[in-house]
Image (cartoon, coloured by chain):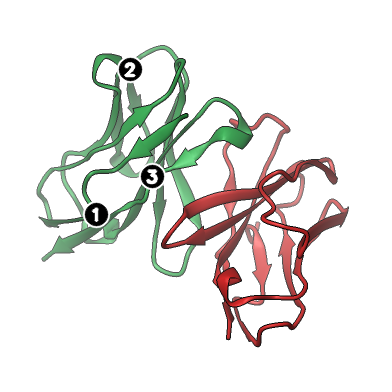
Chain colours: A green, B red
Amino acid sequence: AQSVTQPDIHITVSEGASLELRCNYSYGATPYLFWYVQSPGQGLQLLLKYFSGDTLVQGIKGFEAEFKRSQSSFNLRKPSVHWSDAAEYFCAVGGTYNDMRFGAGTRLTVKP
Amino acid sequence: DAGVIQSPRHEVTEMGQEVTLRCKPISGHNSLFWYRQTMMRGLELLIYFNNNVPIDDSGMPEDRFSAKMPNASFSTLKIQPSEPRDSAVYFCASSFTGVWTDTQYFGPGTRLTVL
Protein backbone atom coordinates (compact mmCIF):
# COMPACT_ATOMS: atom_id res chain seq x y z
CA ALA A 1 0.00 0.00 0.00
CA GLN A 2 1.17 3.50 -0.69
CA SER A 3 2.37 5.63 2.16
CA VAL A 4 4.20 8.85 2.75
CA THR A 5 6.50 9.72 5.63
CA GLN A 6 7.60 13.11 6.79
CA PRO A 7 10.32 12.30 9.32
CA ASP A 8 10.45 15.74 10.92
CA ILE A 9 7.45 16.76 12.97
CA HIS A 10 8.82 20.20 13.77
CA ILE A 11 11.69 22.22 12.31
CA THR A 12 13.00 25.59 13.41
CA VAL A 13 15.15 27.73 11.14
CA SER A 14 16.38 31.28 11.30
CA GLU A 15 15.03 33.81 8.88
CA GLY A 16 17.26 33.95 5.83
CA ALA A 17 18.57 30.44 6.33
CA SER A 18 18.01 27.64 3.86
CA LEU A 19 15.31 25.05 4.36
CA GLU A 20 14.86 21.42 3.43
CA LEU A 21 11.80 19.42 4.40
CA ARG A 22 11.98 15.69 3.91
CA CYS A 23 9.42 13.44 2.34
CA ASN A 24 9.76 9.73 1.68
CA TYR A 25 7.13 7.66 -0.04
CA SER A 26 6.23 4.10 -0.80
CA TYR A 27 4.35 3.47 -4.02
CA GLY A 28 4.15 0.61 -6.47
CA ALA A 29 4.56 2.71 -9.60
CA THR A 30 5.73 6.18 -10.43
CA PRO A 31 3.57 8.33 -8.20
CA TYR A 32 2.17 11.77 -8.48
CA LEU A 33 3.79 13.89 -5.77
CA PHE A 34 2.62 17.10 -4.16
CA TRP A 35 3.66 19.59 -1.53
CA TYR A 36 1.05 21.70 0.24
CA VAL A 37 1.36 24.45 2.83
CA GLN A 38 -1.20 25.18 5.52
CA SER A 39 -1.08 28.45 7.43
CA PRO A 40 -2.84 28.61 10.79
CA GLY A 41 -6.60 28.65 10.39
CA GLN A 42 -6.36 28.24 6.64
CA GLY A 43 -6.86 25.49 4.12
CA LEU A 44 -4.09 23.81 2.23
CA GLN A 45 -2.42 25.60 -0.65
CA LEU A 46 -0.57 23.73 -3.37
CA LEU A 47 3.10 24.69 -3.57
CA LEU A 48 4.15 22.37 -6.38
CA LYS A 49 3.53 19.00 -7.94
CA TYR A 50 5.46 16.40 -9.88
CA PHE A 51 4.05 14.00 -12.43
CA SER A 52 6.90 13.31 -14.84
CA GLY A 53 9.78 14.93 -16.66
CA ASP A 54 12.37 17.14 -15.04
CA THR A 55 12.93 15.86 -11.53
CA LEU A 56 13.52 19.35 -10.15
CA VAL A 57 10.19 21.11 -9.83
CA GLN A 58 9.71 24.80 -9.23
CA GLY A 59 6.75 26.00 -7.24
CA ILE A 60 5.25 29.13 -5.85
CA LYS A 61 6.75 31.33 -3.13
CA GLY A 62 10.29 30.39 -4.13
CA PHE A 63 10.00 26.71 -3.23
CA GLU A 64 11.39 23.82 -5.23
CA ALA A 65 11.39 20.07 -4.79
CA GLU A 66 13.47 17.28 -6.22
CA PHE A 67 12.17 13.83 -7.07
CA LYS A 68 14.73 11.11 -6.43
CA ARG A 69 13.40 7.76 -7.53
CA SER A 70 16.35 5.79 -6.13
CA GLN A 71 15.73 7.22 -2.68
CA SER A 72 11.92 7.34 -2.92
CA SER A 73 12.12 10.93 -1.82
CA PHE A 74 10.58 14.25 -2.77
CA ASN A 75 12.23 16.85 -0.54
CA LEU A 76 11.10 20.45 -0.47
CA ARG A 77 13.69 23.22 -0.43
CA LYS A 78 13.91 26.96 -0.19
CA PRO A 79 17.23 28.86 -0.31
CA SER A 80 16.21 31.66 2.06
CA VAL A 81 13.30 31.40 4.46
CA HIS A 82 11.06 34.35 5.26
CA TRP A 83 9.07 34.78 8.47
CA SER A 84 5.88 34.38 6.44
CA ASP A 85 6.90 30.81 5.56
CA ALA A 86 6.07 29.69 9.09
CA ALA A 87 3.31 27.13 8.56
CA GLU A 88 2.69 23.43 8.33
CA TYR A 89 3.85 21.61 5.23
CA PHE A 90 2.32 18.44 3.86
CA CYS A 91 3.72 16.04 1.32
CA ALA A 92 1.21 13.91 -0.60
CA VAL A 93 1.55 10.95 -2.95
CA GLY A 94 -0.88 9.04 -5.10
CA GLY A 95 -1.81 7.65 -8.45
CA THR A 96 -5.49 8.48 -8.51
CA TYR A 97 -7.77 10.78 -6.56
CA ASN A 98 -8.91 8.10 -4.19
CA ASP A 99 -5.55 6.65 -3.29
CA MET A 100 -3.82 9.87 -2.48
CA ARG A 101 -2.12 9.86 0.89
CA PHE A 102 -0.97 12.85 2.86
CA GLY A 103 1.96 12.85 5.24
CA ALA A 104 1.50 13.83 8.86
CA GLY A 105 3.00 17.23 8.19
CA THR A 106 6.06 19.20 9.27
CA ARG A 107 5.57 22.33 11.29
CA LEU A 108 8.02 25.08 10.39
CA THR A 109 8.95 27.77 12.89
CA VAL A 110 11.00 30.72 11.67
CA LYS A 111 13.21 32.53 14.19
CA PRO A 112 13.81 36.25 13.67
CA ASP B 1 -12.73 35.62 -6.65
CA ALA B 2 -13.43 35.00 -2.97
CA GLY B 3 -12.05 31.48 -3.06
CA VAL B 4 -13.76 28.47 -1.58
CA ILE B 5 -16.16 29.52 1.14
CA GLN B 6 -17.07 27.27 4.04
CA SER B 7 -19.55 27.82 6.83
CA PRO B 8 -19.64 27.74 9.70
CA ARG B 9 -15.97 28.17 10.59
CA HIS B 10 -16.52 26.64 14.00
CA GLU B 11 -19.26 24.35 15.21
CA VAL B 12 -19.74 22.97 18.68
CA THR B 13 -22.53 20.50 19.18
CA GLU B 14 -23.61 17.73 21.46
CA MET B 15 -23.48 14.06 20.67
CA GLY B 16 -26.56 12.92 18.80
CA GLN B 17 -27.26 16.24 17.14
CA GLU B 18 -27.36 16.76 13.42
CA VAL B 19 -24.55 18.82 11.92
CA THR B 20 -24.55 20.41 8.48
CA LEU B 21 -21.41 21.85 6.96
CA ARG B 22 -21.64 24.04 3.89
CA CYS B 23 -19.34 24.79 1.00
CA LYS B 24 -19.40 27.18 -1.92
CA PRO B 25 -16.77 26.26 -4.51
CA ILE B 26 -14.97 28.69 -6.74
CA SER B 27 -17.21 29.77 -9.60
CA GLY B 28 -16.52 27.78 -12.74
CA HIS B 29 -14.90 24.87 -10.97
CA ASN B 30 -16.31 21.49 -11.91
CA SER B 31 -14.97 19.29 -9.14
CA LEU B 32 -15.50 19.42 -5.42
CA PHE B 33 -13.84 17.43 -2.66
CA TRP B 34 -14.64 17.02 1.03
CA TYR B 35 -11.74 16.15 3.35
CA ARG B 36 -11.44 15.50 7.07
CA GLN B 37 -8.32 16.33 9.05
CA THR B 38 -7.54 14.84 12.46
CA MET B 39 -4.37 14.48 14.45
CA MET B 40 -4.65 10.72 14.44
CA ARG B 41 -5.48 10.09 10.80
CA GLY B 42 -4.21 13.20 9.06
CA LEU B 43 -6.04 14.43 5.97
CA GLU B 44 -8.52 12.01 4.43
CA LEU B 45 -10.68 12.32 1.33
CA LEU B 46 -14.32 11.73 2.16
CA ILE B 47 -16.11 12.28 -1.13
CA TYR B 48 -15.49 13.64 -4.60
CA PHE B 49 -18.06 15.31 -6.88
CA ASN B 50 -17.64 16.06 -10.57
CA ASN B 51 -20.24 18.21 -12.31
CA ASN B 52 -22.41 17.93 -9.19
CA VAL B 53 -22.43 14.12 -9.34
CA PRO B 54 -20.84 12.07 -6.56
CA ILE B 55 -18.06 10.09 -8.20
CA ASP B 56 -16.64 8.33 -5.19
CA ASP B 57 -17.90 8.30 -1.63
CA SER B 58 -15.82 5.37 -0.46
CA GLY B 59 -14.06 7.61 2.04
CA MET B 60 -17.25 8.46 3.88
CA PRO B 61 -16.75 6.77 7.24
CA GLU B 62 -20.26 5.42 7.74
CA ASP B 63 -23.92 5.91 7.02
CA ARG B 64 -24.14 8.76 9.48
CA PHE B 65 -22.32 10.86 6.91
CA SER B 66 -23.98 12.14 3.76
CA ALA B 67 -23.04 14.74 1.18
CA LYS B 68 -25.01 16.51 -1.50
CA MET B 69 -24.30 18.93 -4.28
CA PRO B 70 -27.64 20.23 -5.54
CA ASN B 71 -26.01 22.71 -7.90
CA ALA B 72 -22.62 23.87 -9.09
CA SER B 73 -22.29 26.50 -6.40
CA PHE B 74 -23.25 24.67 -3.24
CA SER B 75 -22.49 21.49 -1.36
CA THR B 76 -23.32 20.17 2.08
CA LEU B 77 -21.82 17.54 4.32
CA LYS B 78 -24.23 16.26 6.94
CA ILE B 79 -23.55 14.14 10.00
CA GLN B 80 -26.56 12.62 11.71
CA PRO B 81 -26.28 11.70 14.50
CA SER B 82 -22.95 13.22 15.42
CA GLU B 83 -20.48 11.48 17.74
CA PRO B 84 -17.43 12.77 19.64
CA ARG B 85 -15.11 10.87 17.28
CA ASP B 86 -16.39 13.06 14.43
CA SER B 87 -14.56 16.01 15.96
CA ALA B 88 -12.15 17.22 13.29
CA VAL B 89 -11.51 19.97 10.79
CA TYR B 90 -13.52 19.46 7.63
CA PHE B 91 -12.19 20.99 4.43
CA CYS B 92 -13.90 21.55 1.14
CA ALA B 93 -11.80 21.97 -1.99
CA SER B 94 -12.64 22.64 -5.61
CA SER B 95 -10.79 22.34 -8.88
CA PHE B 96 -11.42 23.55 -12.40
CA THR B 97 -11.56 20.26 -14.25
CA GLY B 98 -12.54 16.72 -13.53
CA VAL B 99 -8.92 15.65 -13.72
CA TRP B 100 -7.94 14.81 -10.19
CA THR B 101 -4.42 16.08 -10.60
CA ASP B 102 -5.68 19.56 -11.34
CA THR B 103 -4.84 22.04 -8.60
CA GLN B 104 -7.31 21.90 -5.76
CA TYR B 105 -8.18 25.09 -3.93
CA PHE B 106 -9.04 24.56 -0.31
CA GLY B 107 -11.44 26.47 1.86
CA PRO B 108 -10.48 27.59 5.37
CA GLY B 109 -12.20 24.59 6.94
CA THR B 110 -14.86 24.02 9.56
CA ARG B 111 -13.63 23.00 12.98
CA LEU B 112 -16.23 20.64 14.43
CA THR B 113 -16.32 19.75 18.09
CA VAL B 114 -18.81 17.14 19.24
CA LEU B 115 -19.21 17.00 23.01
Location of the C terminus of chain A by quadrant is: bottom left
List x then y, in percent, for residue B39. Answer: 41, 62
Are labels 1 and 3 on one chain?
yes
Q: Quick one: label 3, few (<14), some, or many (20+) residues within 10 Å?
A: many
**Is residue A101 at all visible to an observer of this figure?**
yes
The residue to which callout 2 is attached is: A55
The residue closer to the viewer here, A8 or B29, is A8
- Kind of residue sitting beneath label 2: Thr
Q: Quick one: label 2, few (<14), some, or many (20+) residues within 10 Å?
A: some
In the image, which is nearer the foreground, mark 2 or mark 3?
3
Residue at the spot 54% in from the left edge and 25% down from the top edge: A95
- Kind of residue sitting beneath label 1: Ile
Q: Which of the two discs, 1 and 3, labels the residue nearer the N terminus?
A: 1
**As displayed, is residue A17 above or below residue B84?**
above
Describe the element under mark 1 as helix, strand or loop.
loop
Q: Could you give the CA–CA distance between mark 1 and mark 2, rounded to whole angstroms?
A: 25 Å
**As displayed, is residue B23 above or below residue A94?**
below
Label 3 marks which chain's residue?
Answer: A
The residue to which callout 1 is attached is: A9
| Numbered circle sitting on residue A103 | 3
Asked whether the residues under the numbered discs 1 and 2 touch, taking CB atoms below 8 Å apart as contact, a structural biologist would say: no
Are labels 2 and 3 on one chain?
yes
| Numbered circle sitting on residue B71 | none
In the image, which is nearer the foreground, mark 1 or mark 2?
1
Describe the element under mark 2 as helix, strand or loop.
loop
Q: Which of the two discs, 2 and 3, labels the residue nearer the N terminus?
A: 2
